[in-house]
Image (cartoon, rainbow, N blue to C red):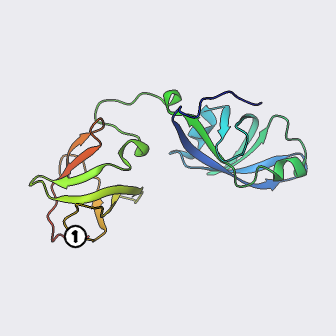
Amino acid sequence: MKSSLDDEQKRIVLGQIGKPHGVKGWLRLISFTSPVENILDYSELIAANKECLEILEIDHFKRSGTNLTVHFAGYDSPEAAKALTGVKLAVLTDCLPKLADGEYYWNEIEGMEVLNHKGVVFGKISRLMETGSNDVLIVEPVEGSVDDRERLIPFVKGQIIKEVDIVAKRMVVDWEIDFLE
C-alpha cells in the first residue's frame, strides 16, 4: 500500500527484512525490539529505505525461539519477497507506547550531549550497546569535547546517569575524565 506520509514525520526503525524463506513469499524478520516479538505489535510497518514510501502489512507470522518469519500482504512469491530483502522496517514515533517517567527509548538518547557533573563535555551518544548486566553508552567526541577519546559509559541510572534532559538533548553523568572504560 502506498502512503502519503509526510517526510517530516519522525520514524524509528524497529527491524530489517532478511532472506526469503520457502516458496510462498515468507521472509525472515530481524527484530531490533526487546523482546524481539514486540515488532509484531505493529501489523503495518513503513518500508523505510525503499525509493517509494510503502506500508507493509504483516498478515501472518511464525515464531521459532527468538527467530521470526513473516508474510507481507501482496508478496506471495519468492521473487516478490526477495525484493524486500534488506529493507528496514519503521513505525512513526507517535505509535510507540508511552513510557513511565524516567524511561527512555534508545532513539531519544542517541545524539545527546554527555557531560559530567563538573561541566566537562565528553561528546555525544553515538549508539548504545546492550550487555548482559546493563546497557552501555558509546560516547564519541565532538567539537568542544574535553579530548578525542571515545568513551564507554555504563547506563546505570542514579549511580552513573544523574540527569537526562530529553528536550535539551543533554545527559549529566558521574564520570571523570580519567576513568577507564
Quarter holding the N terminus is top right
Tell me: residue 29, above or below residue 61: below
Q: Please, what secondary structure does the residue beneath circle 1 have?
A: loop
**Can I make out residue 60 in this image?**
yes
Determine which quarter of the picture holds residue 141: bottom left
Between 144 and 22, the residue placed more toward the observer is 144
Residue at the image position 35 percent from the left and 45 percent from the top: 109
Look at 60% across and 40% down and name the residue there: 90
What's the residue type where badge 1 is placed?
Asp
The image shows residue 169 at horizontal and vertical percentages of: 30, 42
Within 10 angstroms of label 1, few (less than 14), some, or many (20 or more) residues?
some
Q: Which residue is mark 1?
A: 147
Q: Is there any visible trace of residue 65 in the rendered image?
A: no
In-image side of 152 versus 64 (left or right): left
Q: Is 120 above or below relative to 68?
A: below
Q: Quadrant of the C terminus?
A: bottom left
